[in-house]
Amino acid sequence: MSQLYAAGDDVHATARHEESHLDSSPVLSVCDLEVQFPTPLGLVRALNGVTFDVPRGKVLGIVGESGCGKSVTARAVLQIIEKPGRITGGSITLRGESETTEITGLGPDSKRMRALRGSEIAMIFQEPMSSLNPVYTIGAQIAEAVLIHQTPDRDEALRRAVDMLRQVGMPHPEAAAASYPHQLSGGMRQRAMIAMALSCNPTLLIADEPTTALDVTTEAQILELIRNLRDRAGMSIMFITHSMGVVAQLCDEVIVMYLGRIVERGSVDDLFYDAKHPYTRALLRSIPRIGGNRKAPLEVIEGSVPDPHHRLAGCPFHPGCPKAIPGRCDTTVPAPSTAGPGHTVQCHLYQADEIGHPERAENV
Amino acid sequence: MNEPLLEVAGLRKYFPVRGGFLRRPVGEIKAVDGVDLTVNRGETVALVGESGCGKSTTGRTIVRLEEPTAGEVVFHHPERGPLHLESANSRTLRAVRPHLQMIFQDPFASLDSRMTVSSIIAEPLVINKTATGQRLKDRVAELLSLVGLRPEHANRYPHAFSGGQRQRIGIARAIALNPDLIVCDEAVSALDLSVQAQILNLLEELQRRLGIAYLFISHDLSAVDHIADRVVVMYVGQIVESGPVEQLYNAPKHPYTEALLAAVPQPDPRVRTRPKILTGDVPSPANPPSGCTFHPRCPYAQPICAAETPPLLQVGEGRASACHFADTLPLTGAVAAMSPPAGL
Ligand SMILES: Nc1ncnc2c1ncn2[C@@H]1O[C@H](COP(=O)(O)OP(=O)(O)OP(=O)(O)O)[C@@H](O)[C@H]1O
Ligand SMILES: Nc1ncnc2c1ncn2[C@@H]1O[C@H](COP(=O)(O)OP(=O)(O)O)[C@@H](O)[C@H]1O
Ligand code: SF4
Ligand code: SF4
Ligand SMILES: [Mg+2]
Ligand SMILES: [Mg+2]
């Protein structure tokens, strides 16, 4: 088990009885993950030791500024990081229906890895056109995915494709199956991509900002669809977003990332009502809210996200942090500390976990 | 405050739909189909609606980046009085340009990558011969500091900047000639979480200090709630509702406004809403539905809605709605999220 959760007793318990309690063990465990991109301008350390679990049958949200490593995390799980980027450390463990797989032990192009993509882990993207082929009909593309993984019968595959489209709430599913991607609206394309991702009944669905480019009305439809997948099909979902509204309305648990690290993790209620990390708190104060204090200036997070080429010593947030402790925050990376059940924070304002007594944490 | 600066009446912009191999016009896309709106001096009017409903085309037609098909656009020039932009010649437009500016969604595409930041900001000053030599340099430095950029940024190229910084460069350029009105088309939509807050604050501060009015085009209803004085809601090329932001958000008078507000995901996990889902998509402006264009999606539609177009009528002080049942429907306003919990 990861050190981040070493303090949570229940997690230890499930780890011990993993075989018999498949239902309560996390579907995915990422531990100390490091990803680097060698570039002409120097090494980009996209992920610097990322550790988290995706709980089974829940929606885990990942939030953070652009460039903090959300998409790289998602792509690492599928081993589809763009070249020359690669995983340089850590482990990724998938606990599927029938077996447990060490993803980091598989070659990115290995047969097993290719079989995992689509059948056990599926991913949907912000831009549906990146995974839809413009020259084939929607129905043919979904049927193709079904043919590879499920049935050899072409007519049966096409029937399942139409069925999938119906299940994701596509209006006129037969007509949509016969359409080419460009003939559909943004929301319909997003549904088509989700239908394709779901056609093989994956254990884990990774959604990378699937609603960011959509109108609020279409976004609400897609969020409802994702909730249904969780509640009715018991699917486990990793949902990347930079909308705090989407996090609040959809997610069960949340990870907050900053510059290639996780700075806080907790239940959605912990995050919004008991945020500990100065970055999380600043973020929550900076968003405009309906019915908020109109015309009062929004809180601003000082400084911008630092350049990823630049290696920063200490806490990644220290250049912008109003609470930074000189001599400490700019030299030492804070260790995780437990703020409550399932709630951890990485910040020097809180006592690091050897024993993990949240009440002993210095206060903010 | 209620001194009109921009008055738009009956604005239409139709794009031809061409077909056949001769590319003859076979129809029309009524992207903007009879829009009336007023922006007063120093105020922020937001234009909202789903994508494709005609917001950008309205903005672009007002500043004459598109030729209007019909209608009037009157801009009150500080020295020359009311000017009709829809029929203005290029000389008049040049005289208006310093007072009426536009900023765009994509800070990356809208800046010339071969020009330094200082030449980008100086360009409008040079073209309008407002300043030269040392005075030009001083003005550029002043503009950089107004938008929160540092003097050493002046000689860099746009690619060396983040999205938020590029949007600041675009704003510095737009305010260089002391405009009275800036049309902001999705000016914060492409920006990151915390950067959005910085740019919203900047726009408000510039308004306080320089009295600039904004036509703030956006599909982000939370940002609009924060920045706007009045809101205009568009659907399929037409205005369906308008009014002061607080009243419109608290008690909408059009079912489309209600649906938009209900769909906003509130940043509060204790106020979880499952909005009545608005089904279907925005209809194509090439082939809009009969009567009230919202009727195929409207949960309150009655037979009259498909038959008769509801006119935009006044429904209370400073408010208007285009719904046959504006006065009787019990519509729900935005669910207010908790402000950040105490102590945050
Ligand atoms: N192909 C690549 N080559 C070099 N660096 C890369 C590449 N892909 C990502 N990175 C770097 O890795 C870091 C994390 O990027 P990532 O795409 O995961 O960000 P993100 O959190 O998904 O951001 P966004 O919200 O903008 O999607 C960034 O510093 C980025 O510049
Ligand atoms: N140059 C053009 N030619 C043809 N149709 C256009 C053009 N520009 C916009 N449209 C159409 O006009 C409608 C309104 O577009 P737009 O003003 O961009 O909407 P919004 O900004 O509200 O998303 C859309 O249906 C769009 O496809
Ligand atoms: S570790 Fe220091 S710099 Fe980092 S968030 Fe905590 S107080 Fe701020
Ligand atoms: S006129 Fe009819 S269809 Fe249109 S918004 Fe009102 S009730 Fe709905
Ligand atoms: Mg990303
Ligand atoms: Mg637009």
Image (cartoon, coloured by chain):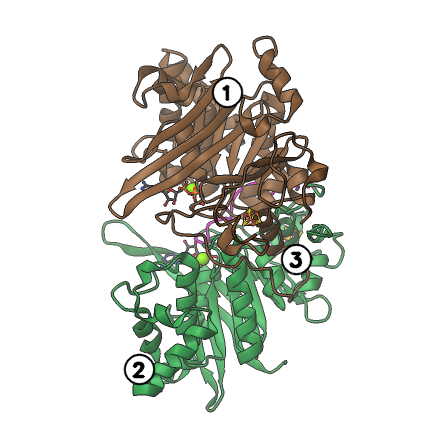
Chain colours: A brown, B green
| Extreme-bottom residue of the structure | B79
Q: Mark 2 or mark 3, which is nearer to you? A: 2
- In the foreground, B142 or A288: B142
* Location of mark 1 (residue): A203
- In the foreground, B226 or A43: A43
Residue A283 located left or right of residue B112: right
Query: From where the camera sits, is residue B132 visible?
Result: no
Whether A265 is among the magenta residues is no
For label 3, being within 8 Å of ligand 4 is answered yes
Q: Amino acid at mark 2?
A: Val
* Location of mark 3 (residue): B323
Q: Main secondary structure of the magenta part?
A: loop
Question: Where the N terminus of chain B falls, by quadrant?
Answer: bottom right
Q: Amino acid at mark 1?
A: Thr
Regarding mark 1 in the picture, which secondary structure is present there?
loop
From which residue to which does the magenta span run?
B272-286
Whether B285 is among the magenta residues is yes
**Res. B126 mark:** 2
The answer to whether the residues at label 1 and label 3 have Cβ atoms under 8 Å apart is no
Q: Chain of mark 2?
A: B
Give the x, y percent position of residue B267. 64, 47
Give the x, y percent position of residue B177. 41, 81
Residue A293 located left or right of residue A32: right
The answer to whether the residues at label 2 and label 1 have Cβ atoms under 8 Å apart is no
Regarding mark 2 in the picture, which secondary structure is present there?
helix
